[in-house]
Image: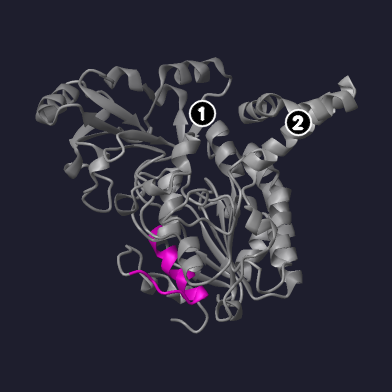
Amino acid sequence: MLKSIRLIRQILSYDRNLMGFFIPTIRKNQFAIFAVLIVGLSLLSCNTRTTDAAKDATFRNIDKSSEKPYLILISLDGFRWDYVKRFNPPNLTAFIENGVQAKSLVPSFPTKTFPNHYTIATGMYPDKHEILGNSFYSYEKKAIYRLGDREKVEDGTYYGGSPIWVTAKRAGMVTASYFFVGSEADIQGIRPDYYYIFDNSVKNEDRVDQVLKWLEMPEKERPQMITMYFSDMDNTGHSYGPNNDEQLKRTLTSLDTVLGNLFLGVKNSNLPVNIIIVSDHGMKEVPIDKYLPIEKIQNDELYQTINNGSIVSIHPKQEDQVDYIYKLLKDKEENFKVYKTENTPKFEYTPQNKNWGSIQILPDPDFYFTGIRSINFRKESSRKIYGEHGFDPALKDLHGIFYANGPAFKKGHTIPSIKNIHVYPLMCEILGLDIAKDIDGNLNQIKSALVNQN
């Protein structure tokens, strides 16, 4: 809205000769309508960045790529591994029965939204692709990346690796995204050919309609790699916890209807479309009395504190004070543990990225760090149970989903639980793309999901 207001002000002040044309020829109420139209156009431009070239449909698949199958990657944020079995949503259940499912999808630590979406997209652990959390400090930029900071989120220099849409684009494929972590950023100078700036108010039905419109485009211009994102289950899980069946079922029923419309539209397209459905993490129940105030461990004079709830990263302002700060925090341990970064548990590897900071603080099981204002707000609510994630990926509650359906996949097949680093090489295999050598994922760990593969 601020951008809209600025735009109107710019129009009013930029060229008085221009406004001198409008004002005498429209009445006061008409001018108000004109202003509203300007606001609407501005809001549209903020949320839909399908460049002028995209509007003119100038993107083209090269001849070789147009012969390959299509792939839609769908993320259902916060969708725990057991939700389908518990609630039996008809469209997702049929999708699974006629395709492939993993017993669960194992996230990377910390089991947070941004790092795990980007791990799925790149096949790399956060330590390598550098999106370490929903918030993290960059020593190179001397700045904090936060998921709510539009400038940082859209800055491709924060993102390492080659996400699937970049890999596909470099191979000559048209790509599109209706939301996915990283898809708004110019990674390696590349964005999806068609993409939208994240806006959680956009109806799920609108997202599905747009994807089906992309599939209706002429073959040369039709996106072959599409990503989608839905946050419904994550929102409900946070608000009510992962064991509130009434609220979860209500949300899932609505989401399942929308997905059913997508599945039907894809079927009616008669195109060789493969669909992979994943989630970034599951959800764990956290009672109101298990929240820890982050303020108790903050010390702005000695270090910077980056809080991701399930892990707190400490960045000393002077390198020679690491041991002193470590001891200072160890002496404060109460419902949390303090570690030197290289000795921190839960990681699948020894963390090497400098941006983690020198010291990590992990809450004890069932505890979670947040601000005192947030804690007080929750205490004023009638709800006593909430949902959080970010914890140890070995906990089954934190596992997500992997479902797949389409001509590339077996039917009625179940594979063991798999790590989310393996999804990227699978997508490359389906699209006929070269798999980068420096990723952490391994096609051999997941290729049994494919037709004619053991």
Q: Relative to 238, does residue 347 appear above or below in the rendering?
A: below
Residue stretch rendered in magenta on the structure? 420-436
Amino acid tagged 2: Leu
Residue 411 coordinates in the image, percent (x, y): 59, 75
Q: On the image, which quarter does residue 36 sit in? A: top right
Residue 230 coordinates in the image, percent (x, y): 60, 48
- The answer to which of marks 1 and 2 sits earlier in the sequence is 2
Q: Can residue 399 be seen in this view?
A: no
Disc 1 to disc 2, C-alpha distance? 58 Å
Residue toward you, 316 or 245? 316
Residue drawn at the location 43% of the way across and 52% of the way down = 118
Within-10-Å neighbours for mark 2: few <14, some 14–19, many 20+:
few
Q: Label 1: which residue?
A: 385
Task: Using residue 134 as the reference point, say whether residue 408 is left or right of it.
Answer: right
Residue 325 coordinates in the image, percent (x, y): 15, 25
Residue toward you, 285 or 47? 47
Report if residue 430 lies within the magenta region.
yes
Q: Label 2: which residue?
A: 18
